[in-house]
Structures are given as C-alpha cells and as structure tokens.
Image (tube, rainbow, N blue to C red):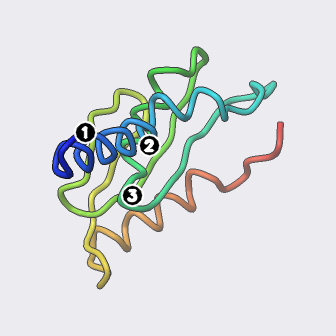
Amino acid sequence: MTDPKTFLTSIFKAAVAAADPEKTIRNHLPAKPKGRTVVIGAGKGSAQMAAAFEKVWDGPIDGLVVTRYGYGASCERIEIIEAAHPVPDAAGLEASRRLLEKVRGLTSE
C-alpha cells in the first residue's frame, strides 16, 4: 500500500499535468478564420495560455493579454502586460485601453 504523502503527491502532480495549458488548448482551438487571428485575454492564467496558443497555432497571430504582476510569460507575437490586482493601477488602465484598441473594428471574419 502507498503511504498517504506519496499518494497525495501523485494526485497533485496528475491534476497539475491535466491543467497544463499547452496540453489542453490543442484540443479546444477553433477553426482558422479567413482573416487575421487576434488573441486577447485577462487573468492570472492568461499569459501562460497565450504562450501555449503561440506554440500550437500555426497561422499568423497577434494579441494582448493582461495578467497580475509576477504571472507573465514569454511570448513572441502576443504582448503581455502585467498590472495590479485586485485594485487596478495605471498599468491596468492602460492595458484596458490597449485591449479596446486591439479589438475595435474586428469582425467574425
């Protein structure tokens, strides 16, 4: 019989692996649009999801995501902005303005 610490550690590792953005996003991607692809997001996991999206999407993309300070990730085509949470700061205000600019004029195509 496995000791409780080993058992609980294995459950934790399995849960973390199941939530890996790069593994999960691949199965949930939409069909490629006729036009350009713009990725936007906000939240603590948004930078990691953006990085995973960049790795699995084989078409051209750009975008912007906003995440909490310390939760950034390295992206080449999607800009990551870190801002305060839960109390907004100037970086969050600027990120909101830039997100709106990024999506203004987009259509489903």
Which one is in front in this view, the residue at disc 3 or the one at disc 2? 2
Q: Is residue 60 above or below residue 70?
A: above
Answer with left or right where residue 31 lies relative to residue 46.
right
- First in sequence, mark 3 or 2: give its number: 2
- Circle 3: residue type: Val
**Residue 1 coordinates in the image, percent (x, y):** 25, 39
- First in sequence, mark 1 or 2: give its number: 1
Instruction: Say which element carries label 2.
Output: loop
On the image, numbered disc 3 is attached to which residue? Answer: 66
Q: Is residue 65 above or below residue 57?
A: below
Residue 22's tag is none
Q: Residues within 10 Å of mark 3 (few under 14, many from 20)?
A: many
Which one is in front in this view, the residue at disc 1 or the one at disc 2? 1
Q: Is residue 92 above or below residue 61?
A: below
On the image, numbered disc 1 is attached to which residue? Answer: 1
Q: Residue at x 26, y 50 (%)?
A: 8
On the image, numbered disc 2 is attached to which residue? Answer: 19
Q: Residue furthest front?
A: 1
Q: Are marks 3 and 1 in contact (CB under 8 Å)?
A: no
Mark 3–mark 2 distance (CA, rounded to whole Å): 20 Å
**Residue 35 coordinates in the image, percent (x, y):** 76, 28
Is 72 or 14 nearer to us in this picture? 14
Which one is in front in this view, the residue at disc 3 or the one at disc 1? 1
- Circle 1: residue type: Met
Instruction: Say which element carries label 3.
Output: strand
- First in sequence, mark 3 or 1: give its number: 1
Answer with left or right where residue 50 lies relative to residue 36.
left
Count all numbered tags in the image, as a single digit: 3
**What is the quadrant of the C terminus in the image?**
top right
Is 5 or 22 nearer to us in this picture? 5
